[in-house]
Amino acid sequence: MPRKKPPLAALMATPDEIEAQFYEALQSADLDRLIGLWVNDELVRCIHPGGQLLVGISAIKASFETLFARGPVAVQAAEVRRLQTEQLVIHQVHERVLVPGPEGTQVAWALATNAYLKTAEGWRMVLHHASPGQPIESPEMHTGNASVLH
Amino acid sequence: MPRKKPPLAALMATPDEIEAQFYEALQSADLDRLIGLWVNDELVRCIHPGGQLLVGISAIKASFETLFARGPVAVQAAEVRRLQTEQLVIHQVHERVLVPGPEGTQVAWALATNAYLKTAEGWRMVLHHASPGQPIESPEMHTGNASVLH
């Protein structure tokens, strides 16, 4: 079934805005919103921390469905570094994740490489490679509503 | 000091060939050759498995110098997946590493995202993000001389 035509806001979104929506979708465990940010194709790839290489939108959707079965992900993106070309953009992102546990909530860090491809539907996610990271000092955290986007 | 003009072979090298040279340089602990494959700029980034985000060619060179102080890295790249645009190419690579230890040599796996940028000097490495991986079954290993490149 073909996708519905995306709204104008989605067509005009920058890679920064797609990225902000990605982290918002994680924070709200919104699977449909999260998957709608990706290129709907078998070329997309995702690596969760310590996980295998997932290829294709179906495998990636299934992995986030499993993740969201445990609830929303309390993740914030910090210190995004950008490499931009006309068709493809690569970001490095420090991810700060609050992980609930028997001894209370703990802070975990991850490092992600996110890539965005310019498609007929606008910029879409094409890669998310996350791996265990280390704390960064004095991070300038930003959420999906941060000033960097406006 | 400006770099010497690169040889024609380096100007004509494809991203696959630059990647093959990267793994050959790891295998031979050849720091100058390895660093010469990167964009000579502060925009480049490298994440070693479990390590911090390194930004800029100086920090990356120092990290590989430390790595090579322990000797060559017995690494092979397997099952490369490619995403190509005119200016920027992203590869996902399964890395198989032989790690010597007190109980003999062990096999470790990593997953890498390697990116290559088209520059005036030809394709050059701009990102290496490696993280702990898992064994893959029946890998079709390739080295720098594998048939996939010819």
Image (cartoon, coloured by chain):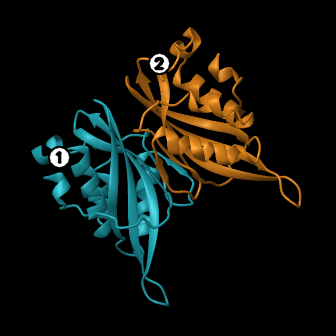
Chain colours: A orange, B cyan
Respond whether the residues carrying marks 2 and 1 are from the same subunit: no
| Viewer-closest of A127 and A56 | A56
| Viewer-closest of B97 and B47 | B97
- The span from disc 2 to disc 1 (Cα, nearest Å) is 35 Å
> In the rendered structure, which amino acid carries the disc numbered 2?
Gly
Residue B84, position in %: x, y? 31, 36
How many numbered discs, if any? Answer: 2
Which marked residue is nearer to the observer: mark 2 or mark 1?
Answer: 2
Q: Chain of mark 1?
A: B
Residue B75, position in %: x, y? 35, 68
Residue B53, position in %: x, y? 54, 49
Question: Can see residue B68?
Answer: no
Residue contact at pointers 2 and 1, CB within 8 angstroms: no
**Outermost residue, right direction?**
A103
Question: Can see residue A150?
Answer: yes
| Viewer-closest of A116 and B125 | A116
Image position of B105 with respect to A128: above or below: below
User: What residue is at 69 percent from the left and 21 percent from the top?
Assistant: A147
In the image, taking residue B139 as reference, residue A49 lies left or right, namely right
Q: Chain of mark 2?
A: A
| Viewer-closest of B134 and B111 | B134
Instruction: Please tell me the numbered disc located at residue B58.
Output: none
Q: Which residue is mark 1?
A: B10
Q: Secondary structure at mark 2?
A: strand
> In the rendered structure, which amino acid carries the disc numbered 1?
Ala
Q: Secondary structure at mark 1?
A: helix
Image position of A35 with respect to B133: above or below: above
Quadrant assignment, res B23:
bottom left
Q: Which residue is mark 2?
A: A122
Residue B24, position in %: x, y? 26, 63
In the image, taking residue B52 as reference, residue A126 lies left or right, namely left
Image position of B149 with respect to A93: above or below: below
